[in-house]
Amino acid sequence: MSVLATAWGVSAASMVYRPVGFGSHHWEVVDAGGGRWFLTVDDLVVKRHSRREPLGVAFDRLRAALAAAGDLRDSGAGFVVAPVPTDGGAPLARPHDRFGVALYPFVDGRSFTWGEFSTPEHRRAVLDLVVAVHTAPAVARRRAMVDGFWIPHRDELEAALAGDPVDDCGPYARAAAALLTENAAPIRGLIARYDELAVRGGSEPSRAVLTHGEPHPGNTMWTADGWLLIDWDTALVAPPERDLWSLDPGDGSVIDAYATATGVRPLSPMLELYRIRWDLADLAVDVGRFRRRHTGNADDDESWNILRRLVVHLSA
């Protein structure tokens, strides 16, 4: 890939595609000197928050998040797997209008998947990393964007709830439209509750901290040097609950430990806000996927299964 040479001065001897994660494309790269790298390519069309959002806005948002990761690492947070700056000092390159490309050092270690933490110690270790992020020096958040409490592809979701016609653009288009129309009332209620909570979330900017956004097990690694936090493309300045709602096992232990470590007591309404946002974002992204051209590939099949389960859950 020529961008490796032009942006980082890396001459690739081999590249192997690695189908890990969901939403980005990854390659393991070995350079001419035997060094190993991890290359990530993001489709900015997918990264947009609405159908009409310019690709440049999506790129700027991704650049700000990855820049924050680099600033956090440079402030002393060695657990942050941040991108390697380009020769021009940028956190990623844009070799094509549609794509953003980031290069990372290859990390040897144990990876995890989305779901439950492997042990209570794993959960507590991630909490410790989150506390370190939230209490990092101000310089670590200087280039990060502030959470606008947006829901990606909300325009697509609201169009589906309103019953707006959808083209026969793939095997799940009409089924997804019917599913949303049949379950519109409870989903609209959830959106209204989210909007109510978002007003409160934006009314206390003094509580905002640098957040990772998705500190789930799949974004952690265990290495010889300890625990690492990866995938910083969602980093934002936001209320601390953005990183806490999914960490607590339901008994309040993580919430109490966070309050003890930071002196900040997480707020129940803000925990609810981000719990709702996660569901609405998943819903909107999948709805948006099926309102665009799709072929019925394995990713489409998985997205359809996720969408059906989520609608059932939200409508219960």
Image (cartoon, rainbow, N blue to C red):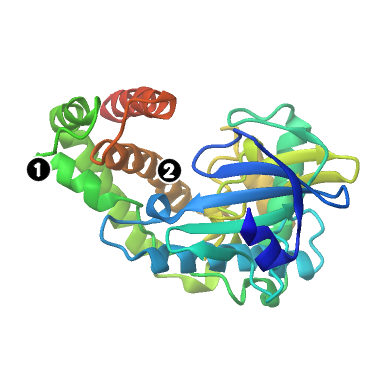
Estimate how packed mark 2 is, as few (under 14), some (14 to 19) or many (20 or more) residues with alpha carbons within 10 Å.
some
- Asked if residue 99 is positioned above or below residue 226 in the image, the reply reads below
Q: Residue 227 appears in which quarter of the rendering?
A: top right
Type of amino acid under label 1? Asp
Is residue 208 visible in the rendered structure shown here?
no
Q: Residue at x 89, y 46 (%)?
A: 225
**Mark 1: which secondary structure?**
loop
Tell me residue 201's x, y (percent): 41, 62
Name the foreground residue: 63 vs 116. Answer: 63
Q: Residue at x 37, y 28 (%)?
A: 300
Q: Residue at x 61, y 39 (%)?
A: 216
Q: Which residue is mark 2?
A: 278
Is residue 310 visible in the rendered structure shown here?
yes
Q: Quadrant of the C terminus?
A: top left
Q: Which residue is mark 1?
A: 164
Cα distance between the residues tagged 2 and 1 = 24 Å
Tell me residue 150's x, y (percent): 36, 58
- Asked if residue 73 is positioned above or below residue 273 in the image, the reply reads below
- Pointer 2 or 1: first along the chain: 1
- Asked if residue 302 is positioned above or below residue 24 in the image, the reply reads above
Tell me residue 212's x, y (percent): 60, 55
Type of amino acid under label 2? Trp
**Mark sitting on residue 139:** none
Name the foreground residue: 135 vs 166. Answer: 166
Left or right: 88 as drawn, with respect to 299:
right
Left or right: 172 as drawn, with respect to 221:
left
Q: Residue 76 appears in which quarter of the rendering?
A: bottom right
